[in-house]
Amino acid sequence: MAFELPDLPYAYDALEPHIDAETMRIHHDLHHKAYVDNANAALAGTEWENRPVDQILADLDILPEDKRTAVRNNAGGHANHSLFWTIMSSDGGGEPSGHLATAIDDSFGSFADFKAAITDGGVKRFGSGWTWLVWDGTGLAAYSTPNQDSPLMQSHVPLLGIDVWEHAYYLKYQNKRPAYLEAWWNVVNWDEVSRRFGEARG
Ligand code: MN3
């Protein structure tokens, strides 16, 4: 079964004013769709074409060398964006509660320190990439990745990821990536991030 572009779980304008409708339309309908189409093209006719995306990304080395870069970039892009849409919400923002809040305090010192670590990862990522909160198998960790590299490549579970490619913010924020990142925290869907945390931690 080839990869499919998932529907956005809300309207294009649901995240206004923090993320504008035109950015969401282009980002989902054109950019994410291109990752899906290109990943499917790279995997078509191979023994990996029906494998779940997390398994493919965790084992890129077994792919033929001439397909590896295309799959890394495009299956990575598909996985990253599929997560990204679900961890945003029109009634997002605020702070997490419950086990996730406790784990963030234990790992980062405070919610403010956690938020600063994720934001800083995005601000400092040179060029295009993502800044992440992951479950690394034993605890929470924050780091950024270049391009469409996914935490799944090192078998970490992405819990929260912010896209810092210019296509994610340029129409509204132009070169002001820090302003986009600051605004992004107003749409974070802590219910979904907490659900993912519970599932990853087991
Ligand atoms: Mn993107």
Image: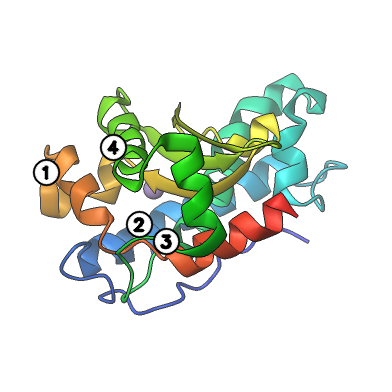
Image spot of residue 31 (x, y percent)? 41, 52
Q: Is residue 11 above or below residue 152?
A: below
- Give the residue at x 22% y 62%: 19
First in sequence, mark 3 or 4: give its number. 3
Q: Residue furthest right?
A: 47
* Residue at numbered disc 3: 96
Q: Amino acid at mark 2?
A: His
Front disc: 1 or 3: 3
Residue furthest to the bottom in view is: 11
Q: Badge 4 is on which residue?
A: 116
Give the labeled residue for mark 1.
174
The amino acid at mark 3 is Pro
Q: Name the residue nearer the viewer: 131 or 62.
A: 131
Pointer 2: what residue? 27
Give the spatial CA distance, label 4 vs label 1: 22 Å
User: In the rendered structure, which amino acid carries the disc numbered 4?
Assistant: Ala
Mark 3 is surrounded, within 10 Å at the Cα level, by few (under 14), some (14 to 19) or many (20 or more) other residues, namely some
Ligand 1 within 8 Å of the CB at mark 2:
yes
Label 3 to label 4: alpha-carbon separation: 15 Å
The earlier-in-sequence mark between 2 and 3 is 2
At mark 1, the secondary structure is loop
Label 4: state its secondary structure: helix
Q: Is residue 65 left or right of residue 160?
A: right
What residue is at 32 percent from the left and 26 percent from the top?
A: 125
Name above or below for residue 192 compared with residue 115.
below
Q: Name the residue type under label 1.
A: Gln
Real-space CA distance between mark 4 and mark 2, rounded to the nearest whole angstrom: 25 Å
